[in-house]
Image (cartoon, grey):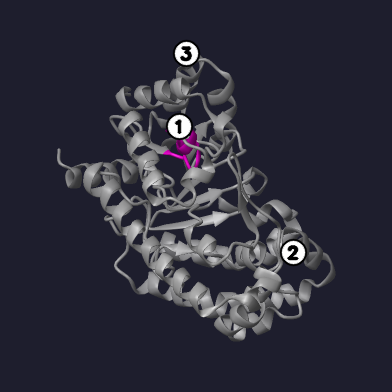
Amino acid sequence: MNAKQMQQSRVQLFRDAANFKKTERIPHFANVVTWKVFDAGYTLDQAMTNFDVMKKTVVHFLDTYPVDGLMDVGIRNQFNVTEAFGGGGYYYYNEEVVGIHDHAHCTVDTLDDYLDDPTKYAWEVILPKKYGASWEQKTKEIWKKTFREYIRYIMYILQMSSLTGGTYGLPSLSPNNPMMGAVVPGPEELLSNLLGIQQLSIAMRRSPEKLDHFVERWHQERMVPIIEKIKNGPGPNYKYCFDSSILMLAHNVMNRKQFERFYWPHLKLLLDAYAEKGMNIRIFTEGSILRFADYFKDYPKGVLTFHLEQDDPFAFRENLPNVAIMGGMTTDLLSNGTPEECVAYAKRLCDELGKDGGFIFSENKMLSYRNDAKPENMLAVCKFVNDYRL
């Protein structure tokens, strides 16, 4: 098969697994981010600001490990633009770690200001807060350098998309356009971009009415147009493995009452729209989602695929037999086990979770650190999943 045929074949394989159709083999979506940098013999500071080095790490990974999809094709953690801008902000990296500091761009009293004019709020509040005193020191030459680097970054993204798709036949998981695929629920915007973990946790207890107002307004202004587009659209888009991707992280700082109040009502309306059109959604549940399982139990098979991080996949299948599972392979075993132990567990996952469809093999956590996996374990697992026939 050529690369285009491989893409189409893999899309169908992902689709069939997500729709609980029995497949000849289990697809493997590699949940790998910066681990591939170490595996290729580089440090993070060598790869984070050098497109050529990062490209080499991706090529090394795809030449070494047979997989059907890849979480990051070398575009996720590039710091070229921020370095050109003079650094600063809340992201950081060194030879071994990429991280982010908890941060709050808004207060609960300025959430409406952000919604009224996000662009104005970004320029007048977020960027000065992010860069501190250095914000006023940005010169015309720095801005020119930054925009040139940003254009290089865009071209690099296109290059990597062409490489991974056109050469290696890797499919795209879902559309990136918010109106078509990548959807951000209101609580996720609050946690990741506006209030941060600490301030959101405080606001849910001290200012719940203000959060009610924000999530309702966010839903009406941002989510309702998406829901209407889904309802009036053609249904599944078979150019992609899934019709939409959602990241869920904010639920980890919520109890059931808070989840019921701030998150579920609007999320349900979105998921109901997808279900009505027979579309399939991948939900990456960072942390644990199992304690909220009963909210998702009534959706028919073929609508929801949960990419699990901390939840036991066997317990999840028992509680939600209607939901497809992506994940299962633990970084604990990949980093501490032997190749034989890793393959034995991979076989159990495929046999018990995938024999009747509804399972996509993946690593439970994004492989980011040097010790997240031993290369020999990763290679043994990748080869097994690629070759194993149910």
Q: Quadrant of residue 152?
A: bottom left
Q: Is residue 124 left or right of 43 when viewed as pictured? A: right
- Residue plotted at (21% across, 41% down): 6
- Highlighted magenta segment, given as a residue range: 30-40
Given residues 248 and 67, the one toward you in this image is 67
Which sits earlier in the primary sequence, circle 3 or circle 1? 1
Secondary structure at badge 3 equals: helix
Q: CA distance from mark 2 to mark 3?
A: 44 Å
Q: CA distance from mark 3 to mark 1?
A: 25 Å
Which residue carries the number 2 mark? 200
Tell me, yes or no, if residue 27 can be seen here. no
Tell me how many marks there are: 3
Given residues 54 and 375, the one toward you in this image is 54
Secondary structure at badge 1 equals: loop
Which residue carries the number 3 mark? 340
- Residue plotted at (64% across, 65% down): 187
- Residue plotted at (74% across, 64% down): 200
Which sits earlier in the primary sequence, circle 2 or circle 3? 2
Residue 188 at x, y percent in the picture: 61, 62
Residue 150 at x, y percent in the picture: 42, 66
Residue 204 at x, y percent in the picture: 78, 65
Given residues 274 and 179, the one toward you in this image is 179
Which residue carries the number 1 mark? 41
Judge whether 142 appears above or below 302 on screen.
Answer: below
Amino acid tagged 2: Leu
Amino acid tagged 1: Gly
Residue 234 at x, y percent in the picture: 29, 67
Q: Are marks 2 and 3 in contact (CB under 8 Å)?
A: no
- Residue plotted at (17% across, 44% down): 5
Residue most toward the right? 206
